[in-house]
Image: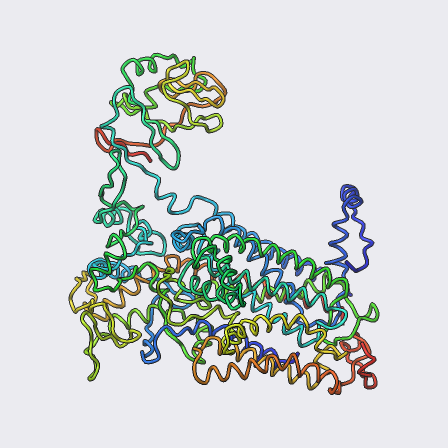
Amino acid sequence: MKKNTLLALGIASALSLATASAVRAADAHAPQPPRQSWSFSGPLGKFDKAQLQRGLKVYREVCQACHSMNLVAFRTLGQPGALGFTEGQIKTIAGEYQITDGPNDSGEMFQRPGRPSDYFPPIYPNEQAARATHNGALPVDLSVIAKARTYEVGFPGFLIDIVRQYQENGVDYIHALLTGYSEPPAGETLGPGQHWNKFFPGHKIAMTPPLDKDRVEYTDGTPQTVDQYARDVTAFLMWAAEPHLESRKRIGFQVMIFLIVFAGLAYFTKKKVWANAH
Amino acid sequence: MNGEQPTRRDFLYIATGAVGAVGAAAAAWPLIHQMNPDASVQALASTEVDLTPVKEGQIITVKWRGKPVFISHRTKKEIEEAVKTPLRDLPDPQTDESRVKKGKEQWLVVIGVCTHLGCVPLGHQGDYHGWFCPCHGSHYDTSGRIRKGPAPLNLEVPPYEFASDTMVRIG
Amino acid sequence: MSGPSNFQPKSPILQWTERRLPVLGLMHSSFVAYPTPRNLNYWWTFGGILSFCLAVQIITGIVLAMHYTPTVAGAFKSVEHIMRDVNYGWLLRYVHANGASMFFIAVYIHIFRGLYYGSYKEPREILWILGVIIFLLMMATAFMGYVLPWGQMSFWGATVITNLFSAIPGVGQKIVELLWGGYSVDQPTLQRFFSLHYLLPFMIAGVVVLHVWALHEVGQNNPAGIDVKSDKDTVPFTPYATAKDNFAMVCFMIFFAWFVFYIPNYLGHADNYIPANPLQTPTHIVPEWYFLPFYAILRAIPSKLGGVLAMFGSIALLAFLPWLDRSKIRSARYRPLFRQFFWIFVITCVGLGWLGAKPAEGGYVIASRILTAWYFLHFLVVLPLLSYYERPKPLPASIAESVLGNQPMAPANVKGSS
């Protein structure tokens, strides 16, 4: 086939495979969240450890009032590519949580301080209890939230994203959501326990605006603004959802170098082999 | 084909083959390494046991890393028996002293897995009043040392420490 | 399998073995001495790439099954356990998940290559039908695999697809309950899907053996679409085809690795990171990209049974292709009209894929209906008519000639050639 065949097929397959990922997470009326610059995006992206630590602080002092993070174990806070905590710091953090353990010898469940091997404990005993406290709304678990949210990227953006390796849609959305509260526009009425959010599909969200200026104290001089809090906690949630992101990108880089070298050798081998066939 | 070309070509083939082999080997590693204990398994490697309810002369079994661990609250007589045994009578010579914590000689903590083929020995049984393995007839004494039968080694002492007088942390 | 097999190992031990089980001779005749047309282009490397994909899926799948738990309560967690705690678990899962997409990219290229060059025509009908069977098995395997993480898309995808069978008049509901093992998609469904997801790849491997066997019996088609006439037309599989396949495969791996390491969730759905909830359907249910064209056909028909029939029919139709396209000329190179219709068909399929991802409303539905109609018209009307009315271009006298660029022969006789 001709060269344009290759091009056409390439576009064709890219088109069809990419449409799937352009799932319409946001309603048509919700605007597309603005793209942020994240330290962990791109082929050489890395987490900013200080940012993750601040994010954890925001999570623990704000989000954790309602949202659990059941799939994340304390021990992982210190693993390579994570928050950079020492074993001692992790023990201290874990020890500040009460974990239900048991049954003991008399058959009773009991509470004990957390250990590094424990997971962030549930906030509510069950879903019904959570809904009962929140007007019927369920505060979702945040363990993989950064991968569980996205927004639609129209044509041709979704194709460009393949080349750009852009996969930060989830964190863009969360950052936008956390900073997207406002008064409802004229003509819109909110039900009890509802709030207006520009980026939430349908706009009426049960979550109260979680962040205020100076709500969480930063000791490293980082500005204590809503935008900064949202940025930090979102980065932390990305780590929580993808704790091996750094090693994935690092190994990916090595694999790419290897494959390109191998492809070069394979190409010249092929050329040599075929040299005497024509 | 002229004289010099084959060598250049051979080199190319060998280089391609070698790089391919390296790649295959590198790809095989994750497939093998995934079978090793994972991070959550490694993290659960310690167990705390409250010793208050364990009476003298009693052996309790607790689980550590999926295996039984015997905690024996030994009587004076049992300790004496273990201490007195001359080392030359032991297939795997070890003093009782080296198998317990100083000042806590009444507590013997051993992994309850027969060193022969991995069965769980029965407590307070056998010719030496320690443990007896029903699978192939190995006899252990009150220090968990092998005395008779096919097992080659003493019952293993796991790493442990006393967190307090009545609390032991295994692992 | 065909090919000259006077293979004689040098080592006496191997000679001893060879006399009792001539497996080396079989390997030699199939993958070393096997004559391949010398004019094969890179579109022919996808057979090898597909074998690679199948191997990757089976190996990573076996490994993942060592850590996965097929229970409603444990599936999502065990997948996250793989992602977080298992050594290189994230790598294995991302390779497996993206591997499915890569497999389909390769298989679609392979199928369209067959369509373009007429690889389904006499004497390759069985070879082609075996390919259609592999494609069906792949779809079943991929569908069941996508259910296993037990996210929202897993659950609702399973619900929607199994409900297709409820369209069968009379016994539909009974069949669906049989598939589910209950009255909804639940634990029994998940567990049997896991079992079958493990089984089917080995069945695919079995059919692949038949596919390769049939291929080696009738010989490969080639871009000129003419038969091999002399030794000059072919080169031995090794080193020629192997060197070329190897290069193509490494290039494919670069593409594969790009997704695995840098955008591993690009081809997936964000909703599948939400644990399955039988009480709440996601706002937009979309199947994996490789099912989208068929999903669009399903939704284009305004009747439940009709939609299901059209969808399955669109795949089943492929099996009849050798008898729908009666032209004796294989390659589209020498069929100017067919070539144009081929590209229209490609655009139709891509268009259906795009529409499959769109909501079933307004203009999208109308567009889906037009393209669905064209999909069927292409096979049922265009191809049979083209066989009779198209004037093909002159064929080269031989494969060697088509490569070495000699003057083509006088215009070939349509009915008599091949």
Q: In this view, does C19 lie to the left or right of C357?
A: right
Q: In which quarter of the image is the N terminus of chain C?
A: bottom right
Q: In this view, does C62 lie above or below C338?
A: above
Q: How far across and down, in percent of the image, does residue B116 sit? A: 48, 25
Residue at 46% from the left image edge and 20% from the top image edge: B138
Q: Is residue A23 above or below residue B72?
A: below
Q: In this view, does A83 lie to the left or right of C330?
A: left
Q: Is residue C20 at least partly visible in the picture?
A: yes
Q: In this view, does C313 lie above or below A216?
A: below
State the scheme by which the image is colored.
rainbow
Q: How far across and down, in percent of the image, does residue C36 sit? A: 75, 66
Query: A48 or C108, which lies in front?
Result: C108
Which quadrant of the view contains residue A128? Answer: bottom left
Which quadrant of the view contains residue C281? Answer: bottom left
Q: How far across and down, in percent of the image, does residue A217 sit? A: 17, 62
Residue at 83% from the left image edge and 80% from the top image edge: C416
Q: How far across and down, in percent of the image, does residue C116 sit? A: 67, 77
